[in-house]
Image (cartoon, rainbow, N blue to C red):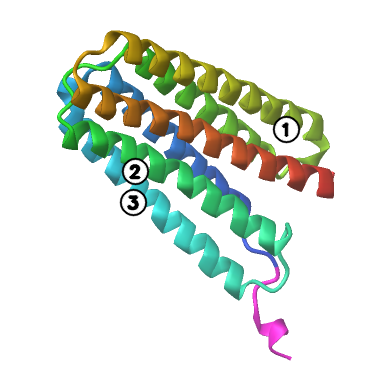
């Protein structure tokens, strides 16, 4: 009875795209922070601002989901996609705050490589999300998801190699602990991007 008073289909795809754009911008700010830790305070503030804005879009999406009767995708998929995307920005903020709190003055080359991979993953997620309204381009979307998987594998290799090198070369135990945590968080960003790619892949396979 009450269903006829509810919106029939919300503009979820626009919300996804807005969120993904913030994700890319956040990854660029994080990469700039890693490239120049002297800018950590300002860059971390920018990352926090973007993460907060993304949180707002996540809440808006969940609110719309609750008040929309007929949705363009499975309701569970919509909720999973937006919350897993939000996890990516949360981790990016964790990395930025870690650099500030630990007062890291220098970072290893592996951290810069990982931050660049985070940017690439975020850009691929954005591209896939932007194509979701066009299921006729399913092969292109699936190709982007496979690309994210390859980037995550590369990030895993970079992380392992970086940690192994630091254990061999870093004599300051406190510095080792700090940088190891940062590198692991950066790699975790690519893990969450892969999670999102898996969700998108599932959506495509169900709806194409």
- Please tell me the numbered disc located at residue 52: 3
Give the structural element (helix, strand or loop) at label 2.
helix
Residue 4 is one of the magenta-drawn residues: yes
Distance from the alpha carbon under mark 3 to that under mark 2: 5 Å
Where is residue 182? Give x, y as percent.
33, 29
Dot 3: element: helix
Q: Residue at x 69, y 74 (%)?
A: 69
- Residue segment shown in magenta: 1-8
194 relative to 106 in the view: left or right: right
Callout 1 secondary element:
helix
Pinpoint residue 39: horizontal percent, then vertical percent. 17, 24
Q: Which residue is denoted by mark 2 in the rendering?
A: 50
Q: Position of residue 57 (x, y in %)?
A: 45, 55
Residue labelled with disc 1: 141
Mark nearer the N terminus (1 vs 3)? 3
Can the viewer see residue 71? yes
Tell me if residue 106 is in the magenta stretch.
Answer: no
As drawn, is 143 to the left or to the right of 113? right
Disc number for residue 105: none
Q: On screen, 8 above or below 159?
A: below
């Amino acid at each position: 009875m009450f269903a006829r008073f509810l919106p029939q289909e919300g503009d979820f795809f626009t919300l996804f795209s807005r969120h993904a754009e913030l994700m890319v911008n956040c990854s660029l700010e994080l990469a700039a922070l890693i490239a120049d830790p002297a800018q950590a305070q300002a860059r971390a503030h920018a990352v926090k601002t973007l993460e907060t804005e993304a949180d707002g879009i996540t809440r808006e999406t969940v609110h719309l989901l609750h008040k929309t009767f007929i949705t363009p995708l499975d309701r569970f998929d919509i909720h999973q996609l937006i919350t897993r995307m939000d996890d990516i920005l949360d981790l990016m903020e964790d990395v930025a705050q870690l650099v500030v709190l630990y007062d890291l003055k220098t970072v290893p080359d592996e951290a810069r490589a990982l931050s660049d991979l985070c940017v690439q993953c975020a850009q691929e997620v954005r591209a896939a999300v932007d194509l979701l309204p066009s299921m006729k381009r399913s092969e292109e979307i699936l190709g982007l998801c496979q690309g994210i998987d390859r980037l995550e594998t590369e990030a895993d290799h970079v992380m392992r190699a970086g940690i192994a090198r630091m254990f061999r070369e870093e004599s300051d135990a406190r510095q080792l602990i700090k940088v190891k945590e940062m590198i692991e968080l950066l790699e975790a960003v690519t893990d969450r991007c892969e999670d999102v790619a898996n969700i998108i892949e599932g959506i495509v396979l169900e709806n194409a």
